[in-house]
Image (spheres, coloured by chain):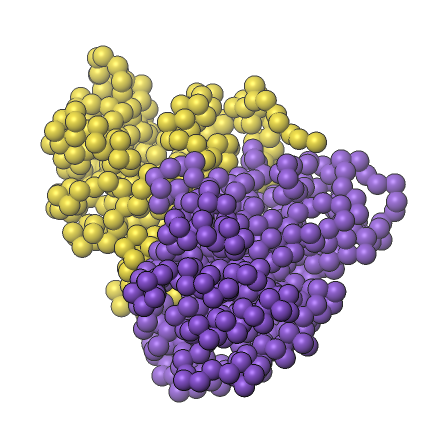
Chain colours: A yellow, B purple
Amino acid sequence: MDTLFSNVTVVTMDEELRVLFSAFVGVTDGKISYLSRKAPEAKPQQIINGEGMVLMPGLINCHTHLAMSPMRGYADDVELSTWLNDYIFPREDRLDGRCVKAATLLSLAECLRFGTTSVSDMYYFCDEIAEAVAESGIKANISRAVTFFGEDFDFEKDPRCQEMVALKEKWHGFDNGRIKIEASIHGEYTSDYRVWDALSEYAINEGIGMHVHLSETKAEHEACKERYGLTPAQVLDCHHVFDAPAIAAHCVWLEPEDMRLLAKRKVSAVHNPCSNLKLASGCAKVEDMIKAGMNVALGTDSSASNNTLDMFEEIRAATLMAKGASLNPKALPAQAALMMATVCGARAQHREAECGMIKLGMDADLILLDFTQPHLMPCHNVMSHLAYAVNGHDVVMTMVRGKILYAAGKYLTIDLDAVVKELAEYVMPKMFTDRTESREE
Amino acid sequence: MDTLFSNVTVVTMDEELRVLFSAFVGVTDGKISYLSRKAPEAKPQQIINGEGMVLMPGLINCHTHLAMSPMRGYADDVELSTWLNDYIFPREDRLDGRCVKAATLLSLAECLRFGTTSVSDMYYFCDEIAEAVAESGIKANISRAVTFFGEDFDFEKDPRCQEMVALKEKWHGFDNGRIKIEASIHGEYTSDYRVWDALSEYAINEGIGMHVHLSETKAEHEACKERYGLTPAQVLDCHHVFDAPAIAAHCVWLEPEDMRLLAKRKVSAVHNPCSNLKLASGCAKVEDMIKAGMNVALGTDSSASNNTLDMFEEIRAATLMAKGASLNPKALPAQAALMMATVCGARAQHREAECGMIKLGMDADLILLDFTQPHLMPCHNVMSHLAYAVNGHDVVMTMVRGKILYAAGKYLTIDLDAVVKELAEYVMPKMFTDRTESREE
C-alpha cells in the first residue's frame, strides 16, 4: 500500500451514497485498494492523518475553456454579443500556442487547488493544451472546436479538422487513457450540415466522443428553429451528431421533446449555472432533464465568464438556482448536486468505470477537505456542508491516480512561479499591449 | 501613526469609487489618518506590506441571526414550514444564554475570517450576544426580536419588550457606539398593531433604529393583504413603524407602491440572496428598489439557511441573480453589488459617517485580500475580481477601529478552541441530545 488516509470521513458517492466516519482508505499503484472502518494490517508507505477531514472523489468539470484565463475579468456586465465581438474575439485572435500553454497551466493550477481531478476542455491550439495536461497530472477529455463559415468545406483540407485529426493521433489514450481526445462541433450556429456530417462520421469511425455547445441562449435556439424548422438538438440529431457518445454544454433552452430525444440518444448535458447567470443566458431546467432520463453533469465554462474554476461554487449555484427558479426548496437536493459533479461527470466523460466514486479498484482520484474551520462547524450532515457551505478553498489536497498534485498551497507538478512569469512577460503583452490603462490616482 | 499598509491596492468605495495602486494607508488611534500614492514621512509603529494585496472597507452584514450557527446544515432541502416547525423551533426552545453566547462567538469568528467588520443581528438572549460582540471587537447593531401571539399585550410587562428595554439601557452606545441597540418587530405576521404601536413609540422616543422582517415569502405577503387589505409595508407604515430609522430584511415580494413608500420613509432594504434562494422564497427586485430610491444593503441571514456567513458569496449571488432573473447581463454590475455590502450597509446601520469607505477620518474598519492566488490572476479590474472571483477565504486580515481581529488563520480576540469545546460539551448536547444518529457504516 502506497498511501493510507486514516481516521477520515469518507464520502463515497457510490450507489448507496455512503458516508463512513473514522474510516481508512488505502491507495496502491494509483488505485483505491482498501476501504474500511478498521485500520489495514499492511503497513503503508505514507499515512495521511484524516482527522477533522473529509475525503471524497475529485470533482469533474465537464465543460471549460482552460486557455481563456488571461481574459478573466477583462469584460463583465456587458451584452453577450458585445462581450464576444468587442472583447473576447479580438484578444483570442492574438493567441498562439505558447500563450495557450501558459494560460492552460494557470487554469490547471486553479483546478487542482479547488479539487478538480478531471476536465472536459474545448478550444484550439490543443496540442499545447494536451502538453499542459500531460505535465500537470490531471485527467482531461480535450476537443478542438470546429467552426466553419466558408463556402467549400473539405474535411481533408480544413485546418481545424486536420488539427483535430493530428491531435487524436498524437494524444488519444495518452498515459493509459489519462488524456482522451474528442471531436467537437463548436455549435449549430457556427457551422453547417457539411461539418456535422463529416465530424459525426469521423467520431463514429474513430470511436471517440463528441463535445458540442447546445441551446445556450434563447436567440441561438430560436434562430435555429427559424432556419431549419427544427431545434438545435433535432437538427444535429438528423445529421447523426449524437450517434457518437456526446456531451452537450449548457442546454439552457431545451424543449421537452429535446430532452426526450437527448435522453434516448444518451447525450449528457453539462449545466454551467454561474456562467449562464453571469451572461444572462438563462437557467437550465436541470430537474426536467433528469426526469426525462438525461445524465446531467456540471461545468464552470471558462474563467472569462464565471470568473473562477471552482466546481464547489457550481454545485452550490446549481442547487440554489433550481430552488429559486421553481420556488421549491426541495428542488435538486444536496446529494443530487454532488452527484452531478462526480458520478454524472464521470459518465459524461465516459470514465464511469475508473472514477467519480470511492470504490475498490477505481483510480485514486481523491480530494481532502478541512472540516475544522468555523464555517463548517458543527457538522450535522457532511453532504449538506459539501453542497451548501464548502468551497474550493477548503480543499487541502488533490490526488489523481494516487499521485498528490496539490497539497497545502503547493503545486507538485506545476511550476506556478514560472507560469506567472510567462504570463506577465509573454502572454499579457502579446494579448493586451494596445490596451489603454486607466489606473486612477 | 500606529499602522501603515504599504504598496497596497486600495479600493476606497468612496463617492468616486477610486482604486489606487501601490498606495499607502495609515491608521492612527483607530482612524484612517493617511491615504496617498506616496509613502508618509511619519514613521509608523508597524508596517503591513500590501504587495499583491487589496485593501478595502470591511463588509457590513445587515441581516443575520448569529446564534443560529448550531443549526447550520441541520435541515436542508425541506419546505419552509417543515424547516421551521419540525427542525428549527424545537431546537431553539432549548437555547439558553450560555448556548447563545458560544454560538454567537463561533459565528463572529466566521464573520471576521470572511472579512465582515459590522453586523446587524436580530435574535433573543441578546445580553449574551452583546457580550460576545463586546469581546470580539466587531461592530454590531443588535435587536431583540419581539413576537406576540397572546391576548393581552402590555409593553411594561411583556418579557420580550422588557428584555429589549434592559438591553438598550445596558448596551446602547457601548464602546463609543461600537454596539447599538435597535428595536425589532420580528414581522407583521408574528405580532399585531399593539406591538407595532408600542415598539414604534419606544424606538422614536429613545432615538434608536428599527429592524423588521418584511415580505420574505409570497404566502406571508398575500396573507397580510387578505387580513388587512394592505401590504405588510403599508400596514406597518400606518402604525408608524417606519417613523424610526428602519431596516427591512428580505423585501422579496414588495410591490412597486411599497418600494415608493419605503423610499419616502427612508427605509433600507436588506437583500439576502442565498437564503432567499435556498428557502425558495424568491428573488428580490433589487434594481427596482434602487430605482425607486431605496437604499439596499446585503445580508447573509443565518447560517442555518445559507449555510455560511460569507458576504462575498452574497455579493456574487446578488449580481448573478439580478442578471439571471432579468436576462440582462448589465443588471447590478460589480460596483453596485460591492456598494451594497459596504456604503449602503453603513447607511442601513446609520454608521455612514464612521465606516463603509476608506476615507480620511473614518474608522479603520479594513480588510486585506491576497490577490496572488491562481484564481485571481491576471487582474484586469479589481472590482470585477471582488465581485466575481473572490470569496471570504481570500481575506487574510480583518481590522476594526485599527485593531487587528483576524490575521492569517489567527483570531486575536476569540479563543476559538474554547468556543469549539463549549459547543461540543455544552451547546450541542443541550440542543440535540435526543437526536437519533444515523451514521452509516
Q: Is residue B391 above or below residue B183?
A: above
Nearest the camera: A97 or B271? B271
Looking at this rendering, what residue extends furthest in the top direction?
A151
The one of A109 and A405 positioned closer to us in this rendering? A109
How many marks the image carries: the answer is 0
Percent of width and height locating residue B362:
73, 50
Residue B4 makes an appearance in the image:
no
Q: In the image, is A258 to the left or to the right of A337? A: left
Q: Is residue B242 above or below residue B321?
A: below
Residue positioned 56% across, 19% down in the render: A434
* Residue at the spot 67% in from the left edge and 76% down from the top edge: B169
From this view, report whether residue B265 is shown above or below residue A185.
below
Give the percent coordinates (x, y) of residue A369: 48, 61
On screen, residue B396 versus residue B423, left or right, reads right
* Foreground of the two, A360 or A379: A379
In percent of width and height, residue B102 lies at 58, 77
